[in-house]
């Protein structure tokens, strides 16, 4: 019993630390991207639209894009592991709830099932929310930079500066900055529905199998 409890505690704390790492990293990325788009917009509002300044914005955008890719490569497998763990926890909960074994009808098992379900739900919500912030920051960045087009045209910059800003605008518009689960899926809010559908399908199958056994 002691070994089982220790194994579960170690696994739980490991998942918690990994979740904290992903949350902080994704949240920081979103903050950096929001700060970048705000900085570009403020520069253009104050008339700071020079070739050198726009080139600096392009360089910063490339750096941000590269950092997102590096962090996604570093944490993608961790995010995938956490999602798999969450889904397995839901499957275990359904199996225990629908199981006929008397060993499942104890207070300890009931507490374990409730705790496992709550932690799995919190994990998937926190991980999906923090990951979706990066994608939302990318969409906000596209909107802010696009709105800056009118500000640039009103300032009537020289041709060299205008071409440079066009490069920045096209790069931002074509960007698809997001974090993934080991490059298998994009972490966004809609992914929760996919997980919910998978869990519900498993629950229905288990229920049908249980009905067939009783018949």
Image (tube, rainbow, N blue to C red):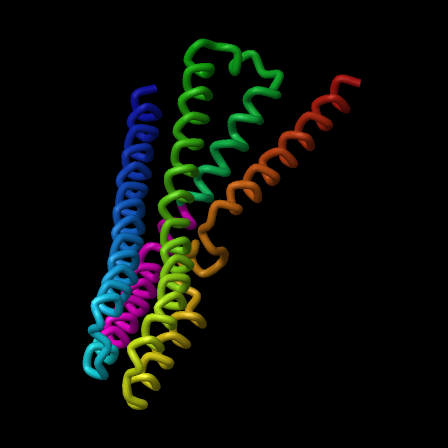
Which of the 4 quarters of the picture holds residue 204?
top right
Residue 128 at x, y percent in the picture: 42, 44
Identify the residue shown where x is 40% and y is 43%: 129
Question: As displayed, is residue 76 above or below residue 67?
Answer: above
Question: As displayed, is residue 151 above or below residue 205?
Answer: below
Identify the residue shown where x is 26% and y is 53%: 31
Depth order, front residue of 215/208: 208
In the picture as drawn, the residue positioned furthest to the right comes out as 215
Q: Which residues are magenta?
A: 57-81
Judged by its main secondary structure, the magenta piece is helix
Residue 68 at x, y percent in the picture: 32, 62
Q: Is residue 63 magenta?
A: yes
Residue 124 at x, y percent in the picture: 43, 38
Depth order, front residue of 110/160: 160
Which of the 4 quarters of the picture holds residue 71?
bottom left
Depth order, front residue of 152/12: 152
Identify the residue shown where x is 45% and y is 61%: 183
Quarter holding the N terminus? top left
Q: Is residue 10 magenta?
A: no
Identify the residue shown where x is 66% and y is 29%: 206
Quarter holding the C terminus? top right
């Amino acid at each position: 019993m002691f070994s089982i409890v220790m194994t579960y505690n170690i696994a739980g704390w490991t998942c918690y630390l990994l979740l904290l790492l992903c949350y902080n990293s994704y949240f920081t990325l979103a903050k950096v991207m929001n700060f970048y788009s705000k900085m570009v917009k403020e520069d253009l509002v104050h008339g700071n639209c020079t070739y050198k300044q726009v080139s600096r914005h392009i360089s910063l955008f490339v750096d941000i894009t590269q950092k997102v890719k590096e962090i996604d490569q570093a944490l993608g497998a961790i995010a995938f592991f956490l999602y798999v763990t969450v889904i397995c926890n839901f499957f275990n909960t359904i199996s225990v709830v629908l199981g006929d074994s008397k060993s499942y009808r104890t207070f300890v098992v009931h507490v374990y099932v409730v705790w496992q379900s709550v932690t799995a739900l919190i994990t998937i919500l926190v991980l999906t929310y923090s990951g979706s912030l990066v994608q939302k920051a990318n969409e906000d960045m596209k909107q802010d930079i696009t709105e800056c087009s009118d500000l640039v045209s009103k300032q009537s910059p020289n041709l060299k500066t205008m071409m440079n800003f066009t490069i920045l605008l096209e790069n931002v518009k074509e960007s698809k900055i997001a974090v993934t689960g080991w490059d298998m899926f994009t972490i966004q809010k809609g992914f929760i529905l996919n997980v919910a559908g998978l869990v519900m399908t498993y629950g229905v199958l288990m229920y049908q199998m249980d009905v067939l056994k009783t018949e």
